[in-house]
């Protein structure tokens, strides 16, 4: 399949983009007091990346997507897609931009009365591609997404994951530069979700497609995204590399989302329960790839060694480590037994290399 060109120019740029509902558009009058669904968003989405847009329900994610494909236009600011300013583009230019955008939906949106092959062929017909070429392209696409054997089946005979593979094949039919996946895995079970996310990553890696993933699940961001943008109340409250945002969330909302995805720091209720079963001082140690580790190639912190050298007995009571952007990420909580001085020494040593949360002292 042809690879769309990867350039330095952002595939998508939001410049102070605002969309209000019920507001008159660009009248030049003073702004009406209507809450904005998307509010002054500045965001660059680099070509060839997978960017996740995350936020709770009503945060403005769908409106953001609709601004990208021109179904909505900004009331203020600009949205530039593939070099075209959506805020001022005419119908002809909008059609050109939309040809460069594929969409994947939560509910798949397949034609139930058409076979898998016909579903995938549909955008090629609309684009006026000749019959033989269409047939060859459909075969190629179905093989790429791993359902070549389902070509003559109808959607009702497929599982959710297979339906989404058809949805992805259809979205890729005309080789768009950009793929928008709006809650594409929200209707799927965890295993199927992982398979579909792996397929999206392959689309990005092998075809060079810029992918924007809209989700309310931080797990989705963790599994495939390079970059993440956090929306709340229409505002972009945080953006950056996935690892950095997970490791140093700046806002309470992002911290909540991260905690949901990693589950590494015990809640207050969990701590109370843990204390009924374990004695000593509780600390939670963050496991991150530190700069020192990156230099040496080692990517873990020798936590056990810090406790052993200080003569502290450490029992792991809670936590989890996952891989994030191919780097270790997580935290674990230990119940520490030893003198206050020994424990303080061990904690100070660890603090020099990573983040440590000291939960309030008990039993010491
Ligand atoms: N066509 C519309 N008319 C009026 N208000 C709208 C319209 N579309 C969205 N809104 C409002 O804009 C805000 C953002 O909605 P949006 O659907 O973009 O959020 P979301 O993050 O996609 O939410 P969800 O995850 O529930 O789909 C909400 O308060 C919503 O009610």
Image: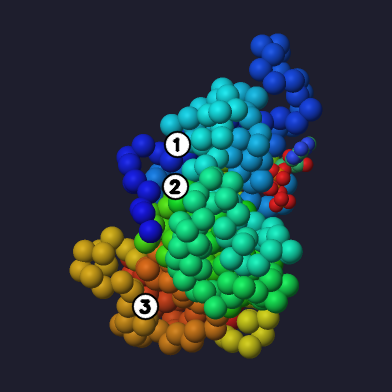
Q: Distance between the residues labelled 1 and 3?
A: 48 Å
Which residue appears at 32% of the width and 40% of the height?
A: 8
Quarter of the image containing the C terminus? bottom right
Quarter of the image containing the N terminus? bottom left
The residue to which callout 3 is attached is 303
Q: Are marks 2 and 3 in contact (CB under 8 Å)?
A: no
Seen as rendered, the residue at the extreme top is 29
Which residue appears at 39% of the width and 71% of the height?
A: 328
Q: Position of residue 127 (x, y in %)?
A: 54, 45
Number of marks drawn: 3
Q: Categorize mark 2 by other alpha carbons within 10 Å: few (<14), some (14-19), many (20+).
A: many
Q: Categorize mark 3 by other alpha carbons within 10 Å: few (<14), some (14-19), many (20+).
A: some
Q: Residue 177 carries which label?
A: 2
The residue to which callout 1 is attached is 82
Q: Where is residue 179 in the image (x, y as percent from the top left)?
A: 51, 51
| 273 and 261: which is toward the camera | 261
Instruction: Please tell me whether residue 87 is drawn above or below residue 143 in the rendered image.
Output: above
Closer mark to the observer between disc 2 and disc 3: 2
Seen as rendered, the residue at the extreme left is 296
């Amino acid at each position: 399949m042809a690879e769309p060109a990867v350039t330095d120019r952002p595939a998508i740029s939001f410049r102070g983009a605002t969309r209000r509902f019920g507001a008159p558009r660009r009248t030049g009058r003073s702004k009406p007091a209507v809450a904005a669904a998307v509010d002054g968003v500045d965001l660059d989405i680099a070509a060839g990346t997978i960017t996740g847009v995350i936020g709770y329900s009503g945060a403005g994610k769908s409106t953001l997507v609709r601004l990208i494909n021109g179904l909505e236009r900004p009331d203020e600011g600009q949205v530039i897609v593939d070099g075209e300013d959506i805020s001022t583009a005419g119908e002809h230019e909008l059609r050109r931009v939309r040809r460069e955008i594929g969409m994947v939906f939560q509910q798949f949106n397949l034609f139930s009365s058409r076979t898998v092959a016909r579903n995938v062929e549909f955008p090629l017909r609309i684009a006026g591609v000749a019959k033989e070429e269409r047939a060859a392209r459909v075969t190629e696409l179905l093989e790429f997404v791993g359902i070549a054997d389902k070509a003559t089946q109808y959607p009702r005979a497929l599982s959710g994951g297979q339906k989404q593979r058809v949805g992805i094949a259809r979205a890729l039919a005309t080789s768009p530069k950009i793929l928008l996946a709006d809650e594409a895995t929200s209707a799927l079970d965890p295993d199927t979700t992982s398979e579909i996310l792996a397929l999206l990553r392959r689309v990005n890696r092998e075809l060079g497609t810029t992918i924007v993933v809209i989700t309310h699940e931080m797990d989705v961001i963790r599994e495939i995204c390079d970059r993440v943008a956090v929306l709340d109340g229409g505002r972009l409250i945080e953006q950056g590399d996935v690892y950095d945002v997970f490791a140093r969330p700046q806002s309470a909302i992002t911290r909540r989302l991260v905690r949901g995805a990693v589950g590494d720091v015990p809640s207050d209720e969990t701590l109370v329960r843990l204390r009924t079963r374990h004695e000593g001082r509780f600390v939670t140690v963050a496991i991150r790839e530190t700069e020192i580790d990156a230099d040496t190639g080692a990517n873990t912190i020798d936590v056990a060694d810090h406790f052993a050298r200080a003569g502290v007995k450490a029992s792991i009571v809670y936590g989890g480590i996952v891989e994030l952007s191919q780097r270790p990420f997580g935290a674990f909580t230990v119940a520490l037994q030893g003198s206050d001085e020994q424990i303080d020494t061990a904690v100070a040593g660890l603090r020099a290399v990573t983040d440590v949360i000291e939960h309030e002292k008990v039993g010491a």
